[in-house]
Image (tube, rainbow, N blue to C red):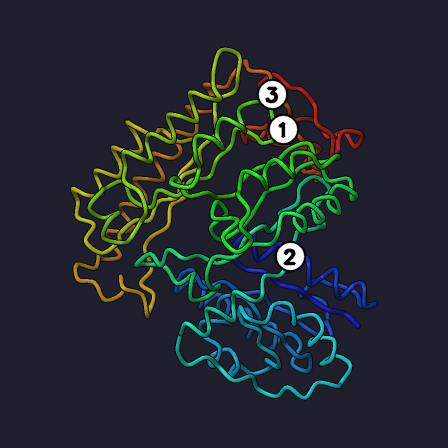
Amino acid sequence: MKIALLTLGCKLNYAETSTYERGFVAAGHTIVPWTANADLYLINTCSVTQHSDNKCRNIIRKCHRHAPDSPIVVTGCYAQLRRKEVEAIEGVRLVFGATEKSQVVPKTLELMAGTDNLGTSEALDSFSATALKTMAEDTMPAYSSGERTRAFLKVQDGCNNFCAYCTVPYARGLSRNIPICEVVKQAWQIAGQGIKEVVLTGVNTGDFGRTTGESFLDLLKALNDVEGIERYRISSIEPNLITEEIIDWIASGTKFLPHFHIPLQVGDDELLAKVGRKYDTALFASRIDYIRKAMEGPGKPKVFFGIDVIVGLPGETDEKFENTYKFLEERIRPAFIHIFPYSRRPGTRAAEMKDQVQDSIKTARVKRLEELCDRLNAEFTKANKGVTEKVLWESAEKDGTMSGYTGNYIRLTRPYDAALCGTIQEVTI
């Protein structure tokens, strides 16, 4: 039978969808584009913003209009947080929340074989300690496949922070992780496919070890020994969890690249405390400084920092926004700013806070940060000019060219050469 898979949201979702795909293929089914007349549609959803919810709902309905006789299976964060809403959409036959990811493939295969007797699943009407505990019991190993050069490897799930604006702990549960031995096993499978680069993914990646008593540094050291994998990136890590010990080890000559994705969210200490972040701007800046001191130097590439920023949190006055802007421009100077306008999420503390920021003000502030991002990114690229770096060339061809990324995440292009696909070559920027 033919199955179409659609994924919305984060890299973690893509890793999980790829794992579902491998399960369906192993059972003898064929994966097809959603535009084909598939016999079943599986949609892995996101719920990070209201826009995400709307997009998921629209895609489910679009699939049903395209193939009204084909059942639809829905999983992911939107399915967890809005389960009754999802179950009510025409065409949806099965819904899997955060507690049930390991059941997605077997239960869907039962549905396709006509042997399921699940009916409509009982929705979680409220979030509770019991729900959290159940989620913690389901930590499905996962990694993405299908690309020749790079794979996303899930090492952790869930979060204990409960920041005031965020629904992630409700959608994915408390922080938990896969044992190091299992993660390494997955990495060896990735290496066996000839993939050279792995991106470690998780909801709160640096919190690895909470449920197994292991440490994030021990995980990095174990992965560093996997033969065939030549490069690792850490998709995101909280500033208070990237310790000097971790930084020193990475800088000592490992497979981990000078590329860090670190969430700031806001560069104002009062707002950081208000929304429950675990650090202040002084700690954040000190981590950036330490990384640069440990990893940069004459002839070495500049470290790429991608920084998450939320614009328009409740209580973000003009003055507080300017604090964020100046902190980024004058103190941090990242290579890239991932900018998110604040989305009011029902059930979160921030949704009930006073001093909500008007959408028009958010839009203007987003534009200012986008302009800053463009300027800082251009300056970062210019600062790396003349440095010799290693580029992993990707297989996609576009207008006779191919592209690849340096270790510090600068995208370069060259004339297409099929022999270079999936190889790492030294290039002077």
Q: Position of residue 148 (x, y in %)?
A: 73, 42
Check contact, mark 1 vs mark 2: CB within 8 A.
no
Q: Position of residue 251 (x, y in %)?
A: 53, 24
Kind of residue at disc 3: Glu
Instruction: Count residues near mark 1 (Cα–Cα under 10 Å), then give few for <14, some for 14-19, many for 20+.
Output: few
How far apart marks 2 and 3 lie (CA) works out to: 33 Å
Give the residue displayed 52% in from the left and 57% down from the top. 176
In the image: residue 144, left or right of residue 274 = right
The quadrant in which the C terminus is found is top right
Q: Position of residue 220 (x, y in %)?
A: 59, 38
Instruction: Count residues near mark 3 (Cα–Cα under 10 Å), then give few for <14, some for 14-19, many for 20+.
Output: many
Q: Which residue is mark 1?
A: 413
Query: Judging from the image, what secondary structure is the residue with disc 2 in?
Result: loop
Instruction: Count residues near mark 2 (Cα–Cα under 10 Å), then give few for <14, some for 14-19, many for 20+.
Output: many
Q: Which residue is mark 3?
A: 389
Question: Furthest-front residue in view?
Answer: 213
The tag earlier along the polypeptide, 2 or 3, is 2
Kind of residue at disc 1: Thr
Residue 217: quarter of image? top right
The quadrant in which the N terminus is found is bottom right
Q: Depth check: 396 or 24 in front?
A: 24
Residue 420: quarter of image? top right
Query: Judging from the image, what secondary structure is the residue with disc 1 in?
Result: strand
Q: Which residue is mark 2?
A: 141
Q: Is residue 116 above or below residue 174?
A: below
In the image: residue 365, left or right of residue 260 = left
Kind of residue at disc 2: Pro
Give the residue displayed 54% in from the left and 13% down from the top. 386
